[in-house]
Image: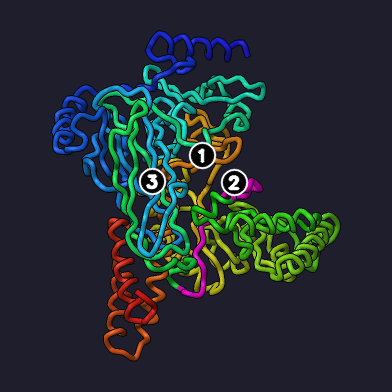
Amino acid sequence: MKKVSVILSLAALCSTLCGADPLAKTFRQVYDLDPAKVKAYSKTLAADQAKLADWKNAPAFYYAVSPLSDVPRLPDTFPADGVPGGTIQIVASCGEYEPGSIVIAPMKNVDSFTLKASNLRGPNGGNIPAADIDIKMVKVWYQAGSGWYGYFADALGRTLIPEMLLNDENMVRVNPATKDNYVRYNNQDGSVNYQWMSANFMVTGYSFVNQANHALIADAPTLQPVVLNKNEFKQYFITVKVPEKAPGGLYTGSVDLIADGKVIGKAPIAVKVLPFQLPAPKTNYNQNKGFYLSMYGTGTRNPANLKNLAAHNCTNPMGFPSINPFDAERTRKDIQLAKDCGINTAPLLSGATRVGVTVWQKEEDLKGANLRKIERLRNALKMTREIALKELGHTNYYSYGVDEGGPGTIRAERIAWKEAHANGGKIMVSTHPHGELIFALDYMVQPGAPAPTRIKNVNEFHEANPDGLCGWYANPHTGPENPDYFRRVHGYQSWKSNYDVAANYVWWRNNWNDMATPYEEFLRGLVLVYSAREKVIDTITWEGIREGMDDVKYASYLKGLALEAAASKDGAVLDMGRRILAWLAYNDEERCDLDTFRLECINNILKLRKALNKGN
């Protein structure tokens, strides 16, 4: 412990000597800027500002940018894809969350800067209140050297990465001189201190207790002012929640840019609300089967986190609600909590008594300890069925087997799986596709993201199990921050590859320190969100996955309409349906621009709705 204290003291001393002290009460966040980059873009900034009549003398202006770019937006990364002074343009269906983004370009230092959205006014009295426009600052901090692109540890490298979506920039402070992160702790006695959150293994060891104490971490409830430094870009993420019954049409308003208490300009925002609400997503290969986002690590009883999952299209989280055969009252409360938070109660994925019970005997030869194991499991499964029928009215739940079990383990689980089926349940587990050995498996979570060989395995599994589900996890695990890639692989690419579930590992666990991760020291922190006291802290990657699921919603809705049109007796409608089905079949899910794909889906949906007399 003495060694740890010495290292922490040295880190704080180095921070004080090398630049802005991240432990100081008064702190101005600065980053090291590449002088060559600044020299290259400073003239462009001045020229762009000069073209904007309303912004000529402002201490800062902005660029409207794509919110989910595959280019990391760093303090010295010029927003080449941005429109100076442009409109924040959003297209969304009723009930949908949809993001926009701006990058602030400071022309001089500002001590206090913030944004404030207006209400958005639409046709026929339509209104999107400012309260439904969530503005967050994108925090840039240090992650392992493989950050943005990889999920393997890199103990020798540290790189700046844009990731967390914060209300309060000062919740996380970074020191560019030492490439260290510090996270604010709000202690129970009312005091505040900053915890070193980039220590290496020499300090932390491998234990979770030396990761973050998330009970002491909390973001501010509302957007707080930040500092602006000349020539240092800062990104904001702007998410609009469209009311479910909003009249279709164009909604307009603005976002005020406020520097040192004065409005220095307005960024116009325009939201095109589509005249429909997206139905629940269906699989590509079967319109009668649902497509699910069900990440590992999503089992939680925290209402705020459950609502976060539902808002991000993870309405069937893995492990919640769960049927406890020995606590009917707990089960009843969990089911009600799920309903209150927008979580589905069918199917329950990993929501029942685990069946990872192995016996190395034939069923007819069971005796002794093995017989007692199966009898205990049988009783638990029987109770599970009784509670499910009483509280849910169905047995559409999945019990989890032995994680990543090989062929021998699968054989040894067969009796347990048979007991689950005899009591009306289903089996799920992560495993490699061991051919005919997995005939009793109802939901295979296959290691590895969609790829040709794995897609072949998926199609074979469906052929052998027409009602079965197939998902994927790992390779990549969560960890890479690139929102464009995670949008694609968890959304359209999984759907097009005939998966039923995107089930990656892991949504969250206590991995705040990317430089020293418990469990697998060769991996980075495997998280999509960060644990905190009241609720998790979102990231641009998590927002990317929400967009990926929305892509699936649009694609599956379009396919359903196209199939209906292709069965029409009207030749023109039939031709339209088949043409759109061909477009969906041959579109390249690995390389297409996803924003363009989304707009094409919307265009075709509107055409089909009109042709099928389903509205505008």
Amino acid carrying mark 1 in the image: Ile
Amino acid carrying mark 3 in the image: Ser
Could you tell me how far apart the alpha carbons at marks 3 and 1 are, in whole angstroms? 25 Å
Q: Please tell me in which quadrant of the rendered image residue 494 appears.
A: bottom left
Looking at the image, tell me whether mark 3 or mark 1 is earlier in sequence order: 3
Q: Which residue is mark 3?
A: 118
User: Is label 1 in a helix, a strand or a loop?
Assistant: loop
Q: Which residues are magenta?
A: 286-306
Magenta region, mostly helix, strand or loop?
loop
Marks 3/1 in contact by CB < 8 Å: the verdict is no
Name the residue furthest front: 125
Q: Is residue 506 in sight in this rendering?
A: yes
Amino acid carrying mark 2 in the image: Ala
Q: Which residue is mark 1?
A: 537
Q: Residue at x 86, y 57 (%)?
A: 368
In the image, residue 370 sits, relative to residue 162, either above or below, namely below
Name the residue furthest bottom: 569
Q: Which residue is mark 2?
A: 304
Give residue 435's position: percent from left, percent from top: 53, 65
Q: Quadrant of the C terminus?
A: bottom left
Q: Is residue 504 magenta?
A: no
Give residue 570's position: percent from left, percent from top: 31, 89
Mark in front: 1 vs 2: 2
Q: Residue at x 61, y 31 (%)?
A: 208
Q: Residue at x 60, y 58 (%)?
A: 343
Q: Tell which of 478 and 169 is nearer to you.
A: 169
